Amino acid sequence: MDGIIVERLFEEGADVAKGQVLYRIDPAVHKAAYAMAKASLAEAQANVAAIALLETRQRLLISQHAVSSQELDNTISQHGQATARVAKAQAELEAAAINLAYTEIKAPVAGRIGASSVTVGALVTANQPSALAVIQQTDRVYVDIAQSSTDTIRLRRAMAQGRMAPEGSATKVRLTLEDGSPYTAITRTKADGEQEWIQGDLLFSEISVGQSTGSILLRAVFSNPDRLLLPGMYVKATIEEGVVGNAVLIPQGAAFANNAGGHSAYVLRRDAAGDGVFRVERRDIRLERASGNRWVVGSGLNAGDILVVEGFQKATPGELVKGTPAQRVPAEAVARAPERKD
């Protein structure tokens, strides 16, 4: 729609409703076009009525040989043409009405509207490259997540081999915000006083891998009651894809690369020398994937093993050491750096 903006009817940064009038374009030209189309339709309808009367009269006169068959045929043809002109005029009137209605630019969706890119008096065109204003729907937000193709293959293989069970029928997603806090509902709390996590639903995953990133795009949708999620924000997503029964989790810093291209870790085995004395043992382990700041161990470690989490660079397999308990953190009860025993 081409025309001059004569009025802006919204406040920048405010919430707008679907169908709310945002701008008005000068309607003078389009009102005139609508009036002309309406007059053309009336003229075409009057012409049809006149030709219809003529056709009726000629049908009566032809039996009296007062008119020829050719004259009647011509009148019938003119009647059909006049009827077609009525249909054309009706369509032109509808088009003029649509153009007139478009002089009021309405919000296509409900949401929060940004800054206006035009001012009153500006000329706008139907094919201009920039939008007059942008409306963001913030009550429900889409979150795009990149998952590496390697993790995807490992996950599906673990499920196929029975090492991981699917988590329910619908995949849930949780978010951690840019400041490190969990995405929770400010206005809703649990019975114990903790804020309630807002979980999203995984909508779909792409069927191809990005050539430049080596990752697969996943998309989730979240409710956004407190408007904490904003378009363009970076968040960390945790997807509850499956459950590993009796999983062994270790701090990521406790595992190190070995010469065979895999990973290893040091554990402390109780020795007969006395209480508090351990023998260092090196274990080759298989790391499945990351879970937060920890690794999920597929094999090589068992529940109850005493793991060296700091100072393993000083450890030598087979030597006797004293272990100092590490400071406990959630789900990470491990041993601290060994001390050599002479």
Image (cartoon, rainbow, N blue to C red):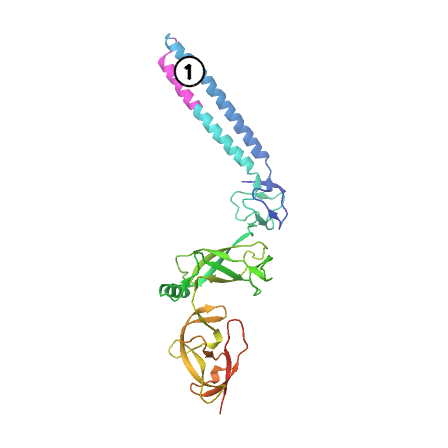
**Whole-percent x, y for residue 279 in the image:** 44, 86
Residue 78 among magenta residues? yes
- The residue furthest bottom is 342
Near-viewer residue (279 or 92): 279
| Residue at 52% over, 33% down | 96
Look at the numbered disc 1 and give the secondary structure of its residue: helix
Q: Is 12 above or below relative to 161? A: above
**Whole-percent x, y for residue 185 in the image:** 58, 58
Residue 178 among magenta residues? no
Near-viewer residue (142 or 333): 333
| Residue at 50% over, 26% down | 41
Q: How many marks?
A: 1
Which residue is labeled 1 in the image?
55
Q: Which residues are magenta?
A: 66-82
Near-viewer residue (92 or 157): 157
Q: Please, what is the dominant secondary structure of the magenta stretch?
A: helix
Location of residue 150 by image quarter: bottom left
Position of 138 with respect to 154 (left or right) is right
Specify few, some or many for label 1: CA neighbours under 10 Å numbering under 14, 14-19, or 20 or more: many
Q: Is 275 above or below relative to 288? A: below
Q: Is 297 above or below relative to 191? A: below
Location of residue 79 by image quarter: top left
Q: Is 68 above or below relative to 159? A: above
**Whole-percent x, y for residue 240 in the image:** 46, 62
Q: Amino acid at mark 1?
A: Glu
